[in-house]
Image: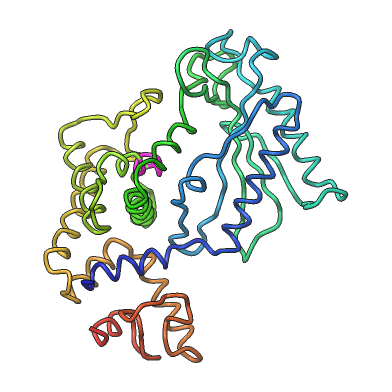
């Protein structure tokens, strides 16, 4: 395996979520869903985002871990809610859910109990703080308060920060359908797509202001990653094809034909530049994937925060550790002597 490909595999290990944090995120999301479904307003719930798709990452220190999901309200109890009713927003029912879930999380007779839990109303529904960090990571849960659309697939998602009665206070979305798309295909395709999304999310997270939502990166991977691609080629393909799309001024359509077109989080010109530079640098490294110096330069440019932490970990551990295997960074290409930096170590281990 070429050096570049080994380093991409190692990068996936570097951005893994701590196993205890990941377990807690899954458990807390499941608990929040269970409690929401126990409320008389709750019809059913769902998980969305990175947890069910398997694209969760922790790209650098300080990154929080949250579980995403939603509670689907019983339309029969609230016919005025949403665009299929009288455009009423679910402020009252969200307040009820906040009080209901918070009280039960803090109940000392329940197992597990979170006496310091706080539940707040967020822009789309509920934000749940459990008041119990896991390995210094604040593990939270976001629950959207949603309605099933009367016609067509998907849900109506509220914006609780909009004025009461505003017709801009509801948006169509299909989080459950997106999970189905991203977990579709053969085992090999799903694995490559999942790994590609994780690398793209880590790259995006390096910037002070990320340029793209995780959802947009995931849908690009769904569109552009094909059966038989290797990881490096898949990441480059997404970066390159997304660059061309922005250059042509074309939107990113929802493959479920529910949500509005997706746009970058920064001006299009800046987004196109980020994608183009990243694609060109990765193309350069992939042209000679065993060129240690070029691979190092590309990784340090595309993933500066992750690489800095990697070096700092090596320095901190150097008094007692002789290899990065002790840090969970397995692989011969990452075996380092005690006093060498990551760059010196990789050159030595060529």
Tell me the quarter of the picture where residue 3 sits: bottom left
With 321 as the anchor, is 30 left or right in this view?
Answer: right
What residue is drawn where x is 33% and y is 65%?
A: 304
Examine the rendered structure and indicate whether residue 305 appears above or below residue 204.
below
Q: Residue 122's spot in the image, x, y percent?
A: 60, 35
Q: Residue 112's spot in the image, x, y percent?
A: 77, 52
Tell me the quarter of the picture where residue 257 sits: top left
Residue placed farthest to the top in the image?
86
Examine the rendered structure and indicate whether residue 201 appears above or below residue 90.
below
Examine the rendered structure and indicate whether residue 228 appears above or below residue 155.
below
Tell me the quarter of the picture where residue 87 sits: top right
Give the mark count.
0
What residue is drawn where x is 70% and y is 22%?
A: 92
Q: Residue 43's spot in the image, x, y percent?
A: 67, 25
Residue placed farthest to the left in the image?
287
What residue is drawn where x is 81% and y is 47%?
A: 106
Quadrant where the C terminus sits is bottom left
Examine the rendered structure and indicate whether residue 198 appears above or below residue 221.
below
Asked if residue 241 lies in the magenta stretch, the reply is no
With 168 as the anchor, is 266 left or right in this view?
Answer: left
What residue is drawn where x is 34% and y is 46%?
A: 186
Main SS category, magenta section: helix
Taking depth in this image into account, of 151 and 133 the one nearest to the observer is: 151
Q: Magenta region: which residues?
A: 213-218
Quadrant where the N terminus sits is bottom left
Residue placed farthest to the front in the image?
186
């Amino acid at each position: 395996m070429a050096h570049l490909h080994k380093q991409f595999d190692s990068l996936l290990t570097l951005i893994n979520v701590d196993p205890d944090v990941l377990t807690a995120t899954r458990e807390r999301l499941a608990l929040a869903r269970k409690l929401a479904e126990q409320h008389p307003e709750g019809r059913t719930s769902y998980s969305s985002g990175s947890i069910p798709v398997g694209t969760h990452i922790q790209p650098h220190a300080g990154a929080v871990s949250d579980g995403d999901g939603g509670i689907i309200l019983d339309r029969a109890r609230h016919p005025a809610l949403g665009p299929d009713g009288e455009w009423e927003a679910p402020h009252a029912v969200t307040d009820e859910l906040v009080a209901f879930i918070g009280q039960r999380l803090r109940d000392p007779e329940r197992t597990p109990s979170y006496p310091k839990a706080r539940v707040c109303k967020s822009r789309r529904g509920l934000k749940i703080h459990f008041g119990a960090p896991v390995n210094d990571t604040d593990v939270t849960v976001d629950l959207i308060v949603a309605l099933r659309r009367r016609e067509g697939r998907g849900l109506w998602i509220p914006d609780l920060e909009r004025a009461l009665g505003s017709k801009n206070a509801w948006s169509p979305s299909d989080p459950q359908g997106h999970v189905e798309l991203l977990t579709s295909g053969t085992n090999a395709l799903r694995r490559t797509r999942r790994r590609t999304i994780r690398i793209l999310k880590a790259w995006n997270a390096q910037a002070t202001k990320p340029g793209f939502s995780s959802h947009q990166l995931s849908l690009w991977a769904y569109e552009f990653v094909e059966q038989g691609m290797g990881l490096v080629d898949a990441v480059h393909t997404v970066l390159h094809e997304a660059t061309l799309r922005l250059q042509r001024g074309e939107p990113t359509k929802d493959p479920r034909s529910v949500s509005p077109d997706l746009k970058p989080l920064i001006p299009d010109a800046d987004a196109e530049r980020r994608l183009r530079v990243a694609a060109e640098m990765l193309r350069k490294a992939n042209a000679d994937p065993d060129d240690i110096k070029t691979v190092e330069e590309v990784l340090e440019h595309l993933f500066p925060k992750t690489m800095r932490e990697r070096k700092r970990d090596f320095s901190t551990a150097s008094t007692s550790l002789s290899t990065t295997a002790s840090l969970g960074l397995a692989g011969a290409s990452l075996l380092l002597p005690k006093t060498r930096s990551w760059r010196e170590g990789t050159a030595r281990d060529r």
